Amino acid sequence: MQQFEIAFSGQIAPGAELSQVKAAIARLFKADEALLARLFSGQRMIIKQSVDAAAAAKYQSAFQRAGAVLEVRDLSAPIIEEIVPGLPAEEPAAEPQQGAEATTAMLQVTPRDEYMAAFKDVQAPDFGIAALGDDLQPQPVAAAAPDLDLSALSLAPAGSDLGQLAGAEAIAVPDITHLKLLDND
């Protein structure tokens, strides 16, 4: 059985007056001003989810009589988001001029529902995809060698003793076998 999602984003039919459409929707939903403001905010708002084809057709005809445009989406159909890139893929990005700041194109995403509408104004750079084989790392900047005074240091010739400390010499223990302890009683 097919399931449908019914959503409304505040669009009215061509030739309809907004005040009359709002009044008709208010009667249809018994809605107050706060709900009407949310319905006609321009953001997609889901009215009903997982309804059959007959109920979807009933909602659509009621909205058409009111002068509003209702969106009915088949839940079994794959979701396709509309993405509009900031720069066309064919045009290479212009090189920044000296003294001018580099600008990055921004990705513009059309929200598919009220949850994605929260991310409508997020500023996300459109980085794009590099071509196969492109070097993604910037070229490292050659750093200048530090100015150090190394004149007090020298190198020992190959095979020479580098001045390691010799192992500790054996300590000669004196012979005390001839000594005795006497009692003083």
Image (cartoon, grey):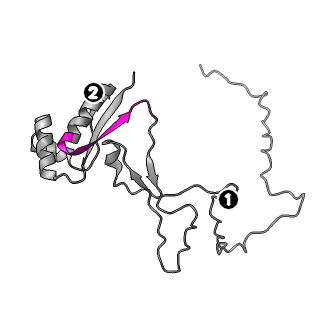
Read off the residue under disc 2: 55
Q: Nearer the viewer, residue 16 or 22?
A: 16
Q: Which x, y percent locates residue 37? A: 16, 47
Disc nearer the start of the sequence (2/1): 2
Q: Residue at x 53, y 75 (%)?
A: 96
Dot 1, how many residues are within 10 Å of its Cα: few (below 14), some (14-19), or many (20+)?
Answer: few
Read off the residue under disc 1: 134
Amino acid type of the residue that numbered disc 2 sits on in the rendered structure: Ala
In the visual, does 48 lie left or right of 109?
left
Which type of secondary structure does the marked residue at label 1 adopt? loop
Q: Residue at x 80, y 57 (%)?
A: 163
Q: Residue at x 29, y 44 (%)?
A: 44
Q: Which x, y percent locates residue 94? A: 55, 72
In the visual, does 58 lie left or right of 136?
left
Residue extent of the magenta highlight = 65-77
Q: Where's the N terminus, which quadrant?
A: top left
Which type of secondary structure does the marked residue at label 2 adopt? helix
Q: Are marks 2 and 1 in contact (CB under 8 Å)?
A: no
Q: Which x, y percent locates residue 185? A: 59, 19
